[in-house]
Amino acid sequence: VQLQASGGGSVQAGGSLKLTCAHSGPIFEMNIMGWYRWAPGKEREMVATVSSGGTFRYTETVRGRFTISKDSAKNTVLLQMNSLMPEDTAVYYCNVFDSRLQRNYWGQGTQVTVSS
Protein backbone atom coordinates (compact mmCIF):
# COMPACT_ATOMS: atom_id res chain seq x y z
CA VAL A 1 0.00 0.00 0.00
CA GLN A 2 1.34 3.40 -0.96
CA LEU A 3 0.00 6.75 0.10
CA GLN A 4 0.82 10.02 -1.66
CA ALA A 5 -0.16 13.25 0.05
CA SER A 6 -0.38 16.63 -1.62
CA GLY A 7 -1.97 20.02 -1.22
CA GLY A 8 0.00 21.60 1.60
CA GLY A 9 1.25 25.14 1.44
CA SER A 10 1.37 28.50 3.13
CA VAL A 11 -1.70 30.61 3.79
CA GLN A 12 -2.72 33.47 6.01
CA ALA A 13 -5.00 32.94 8.95
CA GLY A 14 -8.56 32.53 7.82
CA GLY A 15 -7.55 30.93 4.56
CA SER A 16 -8.27 27.47 3.22
CA LEU A 17 -6.32 24.51 1.94
CA LYS A 18 -7.34 21.11 0.64
CA LEU A 19 -5.16 18.10 1.24
CA THR A 20 -5.39 15.04 -0.97
CA CYS A 21 -4.12 11.55 -0.21
CA ALA A 22 -4.03 9.12 -3.09
CA HIS A 23 -3.72 5.51 -2.05
CA SER A 24 -2.82 2.48 -4.11
CA GLY A 25 -2.49 -1.19 -3.32
CA PRO A 26 -4.77 -3.63 -1.58
CA ILE A 27 -6.59 -2.34 1.46
CA PHE A 28 -8.95 -4.53 3.41
CA GLU A 29 -12.52 -3.39 3.07
CA MET A 30 -12.69 -2.69 6.80
CA ASN A 31 -10.35 0.20 7.39
CA ILE A 32 -9.94 3.64 8.84
CA MET A 33 -8.51 6.46 6.75
CA GLY A 34 -7.44 9.75 8.11
CA TRP A 35 -5.08 12.62 8.62
CA TYR A 36 -2.66 13.25 11.45
CA ARG A 37 -0.39 16.19 12.08
CA TRP A 38 2.89 16.77 13.83
CA ALA A 39 3.97 20.20 14.92
CA PRO A 40 7.43 21.01 16.31
CA GLY A 41 7.58 20.39 20.04
CA LYS A 42 4.24 18.61 20.08
CA GLU A 43 3.09 15.03 19.89
CA ARG A 44 1.55 13.64 16.76
CA GLU A 45 -2.16 14.37 16.77
CA MET A 46 -5.11 12.77 15.06
CA VAL A 47 -6.85 15.44 13.00
CA ALA A 48 -9.70 13.57 11.33
CA THR A 49 -10.59 10.01 10.42
CA VAL A 50 -13.32 8.22 8.54
CA SER A 51 -13.99 4.53 8.86
CA SER A 52 -15.17 2.19 6.16
CA GLY A 53 -18.39 2.00 8.15
CA GLY A 54 -18.91 5.73 7.79
CA THR A 55 -17.88 6.91 11.25
CA PHE A 56 -16.24 10.32 11.27
CA ARG A 57 -13.96 11.58 14.02
CA TYR A 58 -12.37 15.00 14.45
CA THR A 59 -10.09 16.41 17.04
CA GLU A 60 -11.95 19.10 18.93
CA THR A 61 -9.79 21.98 17.73
CA VAL A 62 -10.71 21.43 14.06
CA ARG A 63 -14.34 20.45 14.42
CA GLY A 64 -16.48 22.72 12.30
CA ARG A 65 -13.52 23.96 10.29
CA PHE A 66 -12.11 20.80 8.70
CA THR A 67 -13.98 18.18 6.69
CA ILE A 68 -12.68 14.75 5.78
CA SER A 69 -14.11 12.84 2.86
CA LYS A 70 -13.36 9.88 0.64
CA ASP A 71 -13.60 9.45 -3.10
CA SER A 72 -13.59 5.70 -3.52
CA ALA A 73 -13.67 5.90 -7.31
CA LYS A 74 -10.41 7.86 -7.27
CA ASN A 75 -8.92 6.09 -4.24
CA THR A 76 -8.40 9.39 -2.47
CA VAL A 77 -8.96 10.78 1.00
CA LEU A 78 -9.48 14.51 1.19
CA LEU A 79 -9.16 17.02 4.00
CA GLN A 80 -10.79 20.39 3.39
CA MET A 81 -9.39 22.88 5.84
CA ASN A 82 -11.17 26.20 6.28
CA SER A 83 -10.68 29.09 8.69
CA LEU A 84 -7.11 28.05 9.21
CA MET A 85 -5.31 29.32 12.29
CA PRO A 86 -1.60 29.61 13.05
CA GLU A 87 -1.92 26.73 15.49
CA ASP A 88 -2.86 24.49 12.56
CA THR A 89 0.71 24.82 11.31
CA ALA A 90 2.22 21.35 11.14
CA VAL A 91 3.29 18.56 8.85
CA TYR A 92 0.18 16.62 7.88
CA TYR A 93 0.30 12.88 7.23
CA CYS A 94 -2.32 10.68 5.69
CA ASN A 95 -2.89 7.30 7.25
CA VAL A 96 -4.72 4.09 6.49
CA PHE A 97 -5.33 1.48 9.17
CA ASP A 98 -6.01 -1.98 7.79
CA SER A 99 -8.36 -3.58 10.29
CA ARG A 100 -7.62 -7.13 9.14
CA LEU A 101 -3.86 -6.88 9.26
CA GLN A 102 -3.94 -4.45 12.20
CA ARG A 103 -1.39 -2.41 10.31
CA ASN A 104 -0.90 1.28 9.75
CA TYR A 105 0.27 2.75 6.48
CA TRP A 106 1.62 6.29 6.29
CA GLY A 107 2.14 8.71 3.47
CA GLN A 108 4.90 11.25 3.33
CA GLY A 109 4.08 14.46 5.13
CA THR A 110 2.92 17.66 3.56
CA GLN A 111 3.69 20.96 5.25
CA VAL A 112 0.90 23.35 6.17
CA THR A 113 1.97 26.78 7.37
CA VAL A 114 -0.54 29.36 8.56
CA SER A 115 0.68 32.88 9.24
CA SER A 116 -1.07 35.42 11.40
Image (cartoon, rainbow, N blue to C red):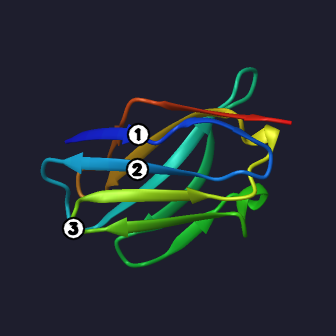
Is the residue 19 above or below the residue 41 in the image? Answer: below
- Front disc: 2 or 3: 2
C-beta proximity under 8 Å, tags 2 and 3? no
Q: Secondary structure at mark 3?
A: loop
C-beta proximity under 8 Å, tags 1 and 2? yes
Residue depicted at 71% across the width and 51% down the height = 15
Mark 2 vs 3, N-terminal side: 2
Residue beneath disc 1 = 6
Pinpoint residue 57: horizontal percent, then vertical percent.
59, 67
Is the residue 55 above or below the residue 86 in the image? Answer: below
Crowd around label 1: few <14 · some 14–19 · many ≥20 (10 Å): some
How many labels, in total? Answer: 3
Q: Which residue type carries mark 2?
A: Thr
Residue beneath disc 3 = 29
User: For the residues marked 1 and 2, what is the alpha-carbon distance in whole angstroms?
Assistant: 5 Å
Rendered image quadrant of residue 52: bottom left
Pinpoint residue 84: horizontal percent, then vertical percent.
74, 50
Q: Secondary structure at mark 1?
A: strand
Q: Which residue type carries mark 3?
A: Glu
Q: Secondary structure at mark 2?
A: strand
Residue beneath disc 2 = 20
Q: Is residue 106 left or right of residue 87?
A: left
Residue depicted at 39% across the width and 29% down the height = 108
- Asked if one can make out residue 60 in the rendered structure from this viewpoint, the answer is yes
Q: Is residue 109 left or right of residue 86?
A: left
Pinpoint residue 90: horizontal percent, then vertical percent.
65, 32
Mark 1 vs 3, N-terminal side: 1
User: For the residues marked 2 and 3, what is the alpha-carbon distance in whole angstroms?
Assistant: 20 Å
Q: Which residue type carries mark 1?
A: Ser
